[in-house]
Image (cartoon, grey):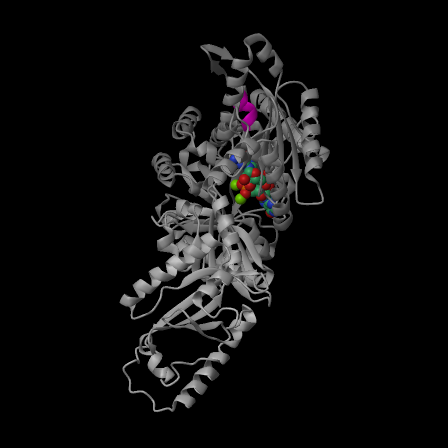
Amino acid sequence: MQQLFFAHQTLRKTDTRSGVADRKPVKQTPREGEASFQAIAEAIPAPLALSNRQGETAYLNKAFVQLIGYTLDDIPTVADWLSRACPDAQYRQRVAESWQDNLEKARHTNGVFAPMEMDITCKDGTVRTFMACTVTLKSFAGTHLSILHDITERKLTEHGFQVAATTFVSQEGMLITDADHVILLVNGGFTQITGYTAEEAIGRQPDMLNSGRHDTNFYAAMWKSVRRTGSWEGELWNRRKNGEIYPGQLVITAVKDKGGIITNYVVTFNDITLNKAVAGEIENVAFYDPLTYLPNRRFLLDRLHQALSLSNRTGRQGALLFIDIDNFKDINDTHGHAVGDLLLVETANRLQSSTRTGDTIARLGADEFVILLENMDDDEHAAAAKAEAVGEKIRVAIGRQYFINDLIHYCTACIGITLFRGSPKTMEEMLQRADAALYQAKKAGRNKLRFFDSAIQAAITAKATMEADLRRAVSEQEQFLLYYQAQVDSSGRLVGAEALVRWNHPVHGMVSPAEFIPLAETSGLILPLGHWVLTTACQQLAAWAAQPGTAHLSLAVNVSAKQFSLPTFVDEVIALVDYFGVNPVNLKLEITESMMVGNVDDIIAKMTALKARGIIFSMDDFGTGYSSLQYLRRLPLDQLKIDQSFVRDIATDVNGKAIVRTIIAMAQSLNLNVIAEGVETEAQRQILLSKGCTTYQGYLFGRPVPVEQFEKLLKQG
Ligand code: C2E
Ligand code: MG
Ligand code: MG
């Protein structure tokens, strides 16, 4: 320090910016003041300079000499300083002008200069950028004190960013924040995407762009990742100034200084709304068939993959159906491709209406369709039956006529089916299996359905054969017989019989009704068969009525739900009763609780109509279905028939006994009589009797037998 011409003043008094200029000066001797100023100035790590109004350089601190290199000897005047620091004349001119300008302005700002940025050529020739903060110390005859902040590093990065930001003429947005996430800089892309101008954005935090669709954890994890790894890249929802939410692709990069401390974050981002839409389009093209809009092979494979793992988890069966239109080429060849296309579109529609929403329908090739059924039964045979039912529905649907361009077309399809349950089957293997099944179907002729699994195919074929046999038997009416099983009262007197149908199959011999009744139900054959049973039963009742020894016998006839729901059922029964002159009180119709899931009012109406003619009703298999006192009370019943499963347990099981007791009590409270079926032992009969059940049916009294044997039994008493 050579000339400290303000040293007679205290430093405190010079502090005009902090608004303490008017405070009373702290009493200090000039020497002390100089010493304390020097101590402080030397301790400041930034270059500091003093110049007087005469344009002389008055003081340079240690940091100045160290960083910039010049001493007071090098730059005794401000002019010297300028010519050394700014060797370029033009630049020097500009700096001098803005200095002058600032000096003028500082008059109105209490001597505080606007910060001035300048490139300074140091003594060693390097050029560094400084931000000069200057204040005019009025009380010291207009001495200027300048502190110079080295912003070279910051300027370089900023410059780099600026270049980067401005080079992005595309929609890419960019922003730079400081270490505390305060936005320092944004580019045009930012404004374009977000709607915020630079003025609105700078100084704020980028969380003004948060969409609200991600929680705080998401952002915390994002920033944590940036701090840890130096960057983060990903998609997220952002919000524009107008409130609109858009998908953004974002890259955040941390900028670190030489010491590895984060100084800035650079965020670049894109609005990917369009990309998303395009991606959707591409996905459509990639996953859907453009003609029918059905999923394509790729989509199917994707689904199949999921279906396999789902099936693996749940243990449930799935099925894959391959459908191929028979001789599709002929349609194309004779009617043209346009008609062929329309037919395929219509086929796709029919496939859709033949399946449920969860099923996948795909088009693999020209006339090849695939249906994926998931989440079926655990049981393979039950699943096979369902898959077959769907296949049949499809086969029939495709077989219906097509109206295309005012012409009627016909076509059929073959269907190959394979079942699957999880791994280890691969997708390709499954596709091959379904294809192999389809090949078998094609080999068998048009309009066929085949399973890959030979055992299943055998079972399905056997069922189909059985159904065909049943159909023939029903139309010929020669293979059915009615067997009669005795019903007795507590004294052992024969009061009647239950008519039980028997099928004497030409090859298989006697087929159990437990086997063919369900088949007759699903195929609808139960209607003609049931009619035959009713007719035969009425005929038998009429025959018994003619004999004094049998005239009192009642005959119970099983009626299936399908039969009962026929609108003509009441008329049919009454016509038969009238035709054979049957005493209606001897005709007992056995219905089941499973019927009650249908239209109960209709059932009640029909029962009431038949009951008005004197016909009797018994509830078969009572206790196994949905037993509700509510509907029991509404039904015009005469009898409850305790199911044999309860009777079986009655002698051994406490619960069985309790159930039977309850059923009997229920029947008594409803004023119904009770019959127990499946009575096989005297012990069972004794217990039933002790509980109040006085009518029985079961092997104890006789098995179901042909009428001649039954009548023999009757004669024997
Ligand atoms: P259901 O109506 O409950 O008939 C009773 C079944 O139990 C008969 O079997 C009969 O043979 C059997 N059964 C009788 N007593 C005993 C016994 O003491 N122990 C054992 N273990 N079983 C006994 P079936 O004849 O095989 O008939 C089975 C089912 O087929 C019948 O059950 C009925 O639901 C149905 N069914 C039979 N005939 C006809 C018919 O003409 N029309 C309709 N719709 N269904 C019928
Ligand atoms: Mg029965
Ligand atoms: Mg029964």
Q: Is residue 395 magenta?
A: yes
State the image coordinates of residue 197 (x, y, percent, origin top left). 36, 50
Q: Nearer the viewer, residue 37 or 359?
A: 37
Q: Which residues are magenta?
A: 393-398
State the image coordinates of residue 499 (x, y, percent, origin top left). 54, 36
* Figure quadrant of residue 707: top right
| 116 over 161 or under it: above or below | below
Q: Nearer the viewer, residue 295 or 350?
A: 295
Task: Pick the quarter of the image with the C terminus.
Answer: top right
* Figure quadrant of residue 576: top left
Q: Nearer the viewer, residue 489 or 687?
A: 687
User: Could you tell me which residue is drawn at 45 percent across and 50 percent down?
Assistant: 237
| 104 over 474 or under it: above or below | below
Q: Is residue 661 magenta?
A: no
State the image coordinates of residue 281 (x, y, percent, origin top left). 50, 34
| 424 over 253 or under it: above or below | above
Q: In this rendering, does residue 210 appear at all?
A: no
User: Could you tell me which residue is drawn at 38 percent across and 49 percent down?
Assistant: 240
In the rendered structure, the answer to whether residue 98 lies left or right of residue 674 reads left
| 213 over 574 or under it: above or below | below
In the rendered structure, the answer to whether residue 274 lies left or right of residue 613 reads right
User: Could you tell me which residue is drawn at 51 percent across and 75 percent down?
Assistant: 45
Residue lying farthest to the top in this orientation? 334
Q: Give the number of callouts.
A: 0
